[in-house]
Amino acid sequence: MRAELLHALRDPGGAGERVRGVPRAGVLLRTDWWRSYFDEGYVREYEPLFDLAEDRRQVGRLIELLQLPSGARVADIPCGQGRHAHLLAEAGYDVDGLDLSAHLLALAKRRGTGRTLRYRRGDMRRLPAAWTGRFDAVLNLFSSFGFFADARDDARVIGEFARVLKPGGVLVWQGGSRDGVMARFLPSDWWTTADGTVIAQDREFDPVSGFLTIKSLWQGRRGTERREHRIRLYTATRMAELMLEAGLVVEQAWESFTRKPLTRRSSEMLLLARKEP
């Protein structure tokens, strides 16, 4: 869930009119929803966000922030369908992408692989042992964090990112900011995909667990389908604490991929944290 516009804020329909029949968000039946969610349906659901021009803009901003030489080793975790990884490889970096979704990895590989671009399947809580101290930069983009039922797993993920970084390497983390999301929370919205399918979402936030639960209803030529996922939202303060506990010090905080400093009303944030020598 990698989202330039966090799901809780997206209102492509403009007026935010609800489509009847969207179930209210409630208790998620499967805590491991992420094992099967990132499939063809995910790609269709968030199709409006997957734009090559926007991908190029984001990668341009990443290159500006990273300030790394050609050939530097970069890990994109999770890499999804390779939207950022293949552009970073084109820009001259040596890139490894890791994702748990076989479907998204297949899409990523269709974009191309090679000597400086490799993909593998894996769980970001347990990165390959051989990756220890390998990377100049690790990227965690598109709200790809906070999936797990146990919040300690989120801390483990940050710890794994720190482990695979070289001393002095940087983590770029981009995702939703709990403060900004709550300030501009939309409980429901809807939009239409390219094939005419209407997708409506209802959302509910639990302030104790920090989970934002999103229930989607699809209505189109293929019939009706319901999908559900959830993500734990963090404040910038808590993210900085998690990173510091792993030996990463936040040096920069931005409003997503923009050049605007992060504020309490920013719905998305981009944090750049450096591994201590």
Image (tube, grey):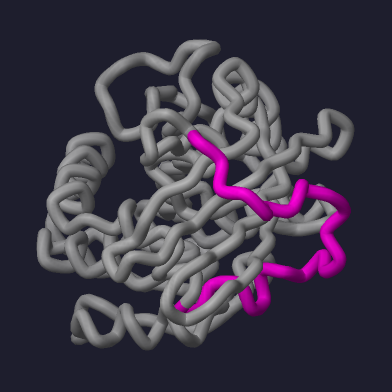
Tell me the residue at 25%/22% (across/down): 259
Task: State yes or no: residue 187 in magenta.
Answer: no
Residue 276 shows in the view:
no
> What type of secondary structure mainly makes up the magenta span?
loop
Of the pair 165 and 54, the residue shown nearer to us:
54
Tell me the residue at 22%/69% (across/down): 86
Of the pair 135 and 176, the residue shown nearer to us:
176
Q: Position of residue 12 (x, y in %)?
A: 37, 40
Task: State yes or no: residue 31 in magenta.
Answer: yes
Q: Position of residue 141 (x, y in %)?
A: 43, 50
Tell me the residue at 40%/69% (across/down): 44
Tell me the residue at 41%/82% (across/down): 105
Q: Which residues are magenta?
A: 17-40
Q: Position of residue 126 (x, y in %)?
A: 67, 71
Q: Is residue 177 left or right of residue 140?
A: right
Of the pair 184 and 225, the residue shown nearer to us:
225
